[in-house]
């Protein structure tokens, strides 16, 4: 059985991305299920291999067709865009931000062209992106622009629990204005389509409550009464398998127990706290609603420990494993 081909951009070179890439390629778990194409800079990866003391040899390639998928071989598309004289671990650097964007863009190009089955991304730094003249706030926005996807969906998966997000990088005040019946209905429809692309066709989606005890019929807030419950009722009438609102203090536990195939979290921290408390290292982000599959670690560049061989590669390994798991269904 052929393995999934997964492109892995190395992220911000000044962060821990290169180290977790080296450790992941050396992992037996990754080698068993995925053929990885690394997109980065050779001098950076040579240093990462040295730091992590991994038994890897770099093979520079121009395209995935040239790759040699053997144990101990790191197949690298070398963009050669880091000047080591200007490079330093753990520092915001426009050169590194621009390079990180170029690694992502090349990986997306490979996926758009069908040369790889999925992309598994490593951490980037928002300040470095800005310093490098890149006008995107993060991965999701880059993937949206380069795949012509207007509003990509974010889903977290950890230990089988899946969580979507109705709102993400906005203030709590702004989030409240975005809790509308129309937005909830639109997201549920698109989230269920995204689940089908992953091969998840059975089960019920739960909508998390916003207020304590889902508002107690207006005692603690009216969002559930005026927006969330009407959205759920209309979706049910239209044939969607959805329930809610269910209090956020219990819905994630129920999902972790297998009662629901997914949960729609209404705001950033609501779902982040639930997934990361369950298993911080194995919380993986999957960007849905796009023509290509993207998984990602959900930790930052960790500038404070970069270059020190301290970082764990568990999250990166898990991101590649999920990319391999879901890519066959995604291609269908």
Image (cartoon, rainbow, N blue to C red):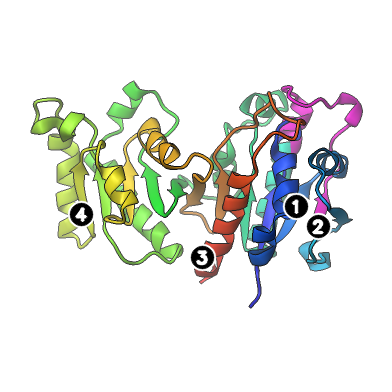
Residue 115 appears in view: yes
Residue 82 image position (x, y, % from top left):
85, 35
The residue wearing badge 4 is 235
The numbered mark, 2 or 1, whose residue comes first in the sequence reads 1
Residue 116 to residue 40: above or below: below
Bounds of the magenta segment: 73-99
Q: Nearer the viewer, residue 269 or 221?
A: 269
Residue 309 to residue 293: above or below: above
Disc 3 versus disc 2: nearer the observer: 2
Mark 3 Cα shell of 10 Å, populated few (<14), some (14-19), many (≥20): some
Query: In the image, is residue 81 part of the stretch drawn in magenta?
Result: yes
Q: Is residue 194 left or right of residue 253?
A: right
- Give how far apart the Cα atoms at labels 2 and 4 are: 47 Å
Q: Are marks 2 and 1 in contact (CB under 8 Å)?
A: yes
The residue wearing badge 1 is 38
The residue wearing badge 3 is 330
């Amino acid at each position: 059985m052929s393995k999934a081909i997964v492109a892995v951009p190395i992220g911000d070179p000044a962060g821990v991305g290169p180290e977790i890439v080296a450790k992941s390629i050396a992992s037996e778990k990754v080698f068993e299920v995925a053929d990885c194409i690394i997109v980065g800079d050779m001098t950076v990866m040579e240093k990462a291999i040295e730091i992590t003391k991994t038994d890897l040899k770099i093979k520079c390639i121009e395209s995935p067709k040239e790759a040699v998928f053997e144990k101990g071989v790191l197949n690298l598309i070398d963009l050669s865009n880091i000047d080591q004289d200007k490079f330093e671990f753990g520092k915001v650097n426009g050169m590194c931000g621009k390079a990180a964007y170029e690694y992502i863009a090349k990986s997306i190009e490979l996926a758009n062209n069908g040369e790889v089955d999925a992309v598994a991304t490593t951490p980037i730094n928002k300040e470095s992106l800005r310093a490098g003249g890149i006008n995107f706030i993060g991965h999701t926005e880059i993937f949206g622009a380069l795949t012509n996807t207007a509003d990509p969906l974010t889903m977290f998966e950890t230990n089988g629990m899946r969580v979507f997000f109705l709102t993400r990088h906005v203030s709590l005040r702004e989030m409240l204005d975005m809790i509308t019946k129309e937005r909830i209905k639109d997201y549920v429809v698109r989230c269920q389509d995204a689940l089908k692309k992953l091969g998840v066709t059975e089960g019920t989606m739960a909508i998390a409550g916003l207020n304590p005890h889902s508002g107690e019929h207006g005692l603690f807030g009216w969002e559930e009464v005026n927006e969330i419950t009407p959205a759920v009722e209309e979706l049910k009438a239209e044939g969607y398998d959805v329930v809610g609102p269910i209090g956020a203090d219990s819905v994630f536990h129920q999902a972790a127990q297998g009662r629901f195939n997914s949960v729609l979290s209404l705001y950033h921290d609501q779902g982040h706290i639930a997934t990361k408390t369950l298993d911080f290292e194995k919380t993986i982000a999957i960007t849905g609603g796009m023509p290509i599959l993207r998984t990602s670690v959900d930790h930052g560049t960790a500038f404070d420990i970069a270059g020190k061989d301290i970082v764990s590669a568990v999250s990166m390994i898990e991101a590649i494993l999920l990319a391999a798991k879901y890519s066959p269904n995604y291609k269908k």
